[in-house]
Image (tube, rainbow, N blue to C red):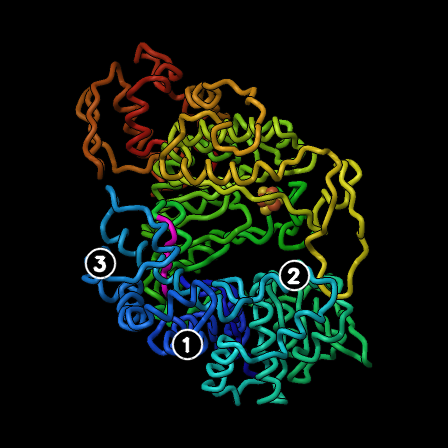
Amino acid sequence: MKVLLISPPFVQLNSAYSALPFLKGVLASNDIESGCIDLGIRIANRLFSKEGIERLFEAAGKNPKNEDLIFFVSHMKEYTETVGSVISFLKGNNPVMAENIIEKGYLPEWKMSKSAMIIGTQNAFDYARYRASLYLEDIFLFYKAVCPDYGLSKYGESLAVSPPVFDGILRSVLSDDDMISKLIIDELDKTDMSGYDLTAFTVPFPGTLIGALKSARYIKEKYPEMKIALGGGYVNTELRSLRDKKIFDFVDFICLDDGEIPLLQLSSFISNRISEDDLVRTYFMKNGEVVYSDNSQNEISFKRCAPDYSGIVFSEYIPVIETLNPMMKLWSEKDTLKLRLAKGCYWHKCEFCDTSLPYIKKFAPEKIDDIIGDIKKMVNQTGITRFHFTDEAIPPALAIRLSAALIRENIAITWWGNVRFDPAFTEDACVLLNRAGCIAAVGGLESCCPKTLENMNKGISIGDAVKVIRNFKSAGILVHAYMIYGFPMETRRDLADSAEILRQLFSEALLDSAYWHRFALTRHSNVFRGRNRYKINVPDPDLKPFANNDIPYIDNSGESIDEMGPGLRKAVYNWMLGSGTGLPIASWFETSVPKPTVKKNFVRRIIEDNRLDIKPDHKIVWLGPEPKVNGKVIKINGADGSLEFELPGSLSSWLAKLLEDSSIFRGDGLQFDKTSGSFPKDSGIKFSDLLNNEIWDELQDAGLLIISL
Ligand code: SF4
């Protein structure tokens, strides 16, 4: 039994999409041989090459009417001459090209390049990467003009977002005359698939469906015996009520939710070891009808494994950075490994989220030892030390325990991921995370308006969220906030208040980046189930034969919230560049906006509140070296310099013992209430005085933390 895993065009350019190594690892540990192909990156490399530009020139014709193509045709020679060196530079092979790329006149400049910020205080090398990326985006525009369905990471997206029936997609899959389809076929043609029994495509989002189906169609024609399966995020959210048979002209099986067990069962079925009734969360055709074999309640055990990156050619990936913002750049950085600390979301209660689906509601944390083992294996296999933890929301307790383990085992990695702005991310917890390599936190703030947060059932107050953002930021961790506007029952005034608090967060330099999403109603959310409560009408709630996720709805509030979208985006764009954070909210909008009711110092007052919230079962943990005591003087030689204090009574020896006993290298620290009980009475001060003293602040900076571990 041999499985071929394929990531279709175009998932991402900077690194391999996580599904391939995740599934490859599990297949290998369960004795199933597999191969993997990132078709998207192969085709991207062909598009952004001399060959691609020449093909595009042919496709554009001599006298194009489209303004993008007119520019391209007249500058074709410059693009042909520069594309190879730009790609080589972006891949990190040719750093000396930075000077040429920055130099005016070296690269042709069309719409995206012309919109570039001018070089200021930025790092010149990063600026060259940014300019090179915009140059590639200009080339995307030209491709888009000859393949209108094509967009980077969005191929055919408009066709695939919740279409009720398959017919539109079918037409697109059957027409294979555009440039990208030809490249897909050409790439597949070069690959010998004769040893494989099953090809499995991941379809993470709508824009990858048509590329996957075009590939599947070609494979079916060339290898009629090959079985083809489809899975991934798009399938999991959109195709849960599938009745339309036509998609089965191209694929044999469609698997829902986590792919490991469905794929292992499929392999057993294809090897004639189980019957089709034993398939798990899988659609297939039987007697001319679409049938679904669930069996998700059956306990099927399998051997877990670290993601396996063998077969991934890291040098093929192209980091395209569309912005110089340090937080936003992280999404595009090359050489990033993906790992998950837990399946599902530990909160799983936000009203707008797909909380009825297993990928959110079934929370299952990994064991710390397993995560540490995975990290070691992945670093060993790839030599890469940057991790993106792809959890829906990293549980704070797990992040804290993992950080302690990383420090204890001296594992030097950097990592970032999604979080809730959960109060469990205290100031000291964030210091610990940062010491363990955490460089960025991406949080769903969603709204800064208390009423809207309550309606969303976010479970976090705006006051708590602001403090947590401060904690991350003061620990040296970059922070991004996802925002939502247009949540049902949100008024224009609520949104103005939300935008004002966001402005204050930027103005206090607490946020590095943010993004406003328009609220979308999905079938799997609580808002859809409780829509009457939200005063929205869903004219057609019935299930459709093909895709079912995004639901058109009518908001009866009459608030015209959509008018505020452009102003919100413009404001955030500027705040991310550090400009206009002092301007009144109304100045960003073309439409009249209510005056915010929030006080101008709302955020400032919250961040100035430094009260410690210590629980008796919190642990005191020391991350630094062993101290030296000489009489009343205690000396600590840390990596960031040395500290020396002269303390009254026997305080220095008590403190030295505290640091030794609470060392992270000895265990999980000392319980706070027990420690406070041993505080020396001859010191002349109380333990609480020490906690509020600048000595404690200095010790905290050196690594003395009070955390829930
Ligand atoms: S929005 Fe985020 S925090 Fe809320 S339920 Fe979904 S995954 Fe969890």
Query: Do labels 2 and 1 touch, CB within 8 Å?
Result: no
Q: How many marks?
A: 3
Residue 464 belongs to the span the image colors magenta: no
Per the model, the C-alpha gap separating discs 2 and 1 is 44 Å
Q: Secondary structure at mark 1?
A: loop
Give the spatial CA distance, label 1 vs label 3.
33 Å
For disc 3, the marked residue is 98
Viewed as shown, does residue 417 lie left or right of 118? right
Q: Which mark is on residue 62?
A: 1
* 593 shown above or below 61: above
Q: Amino acid at mark 3?
A: Ala
Q: Which is more foreground, mark 1 or mark 3?
A: 1
Query: Which of these two is toward me, 88 or 52?
Result: 52
| Residue 236 - label | 2
Contact? badges 3 and 2 (CB < 8 Å) = no
In this view, the residue in front, 489 or 273, is 489
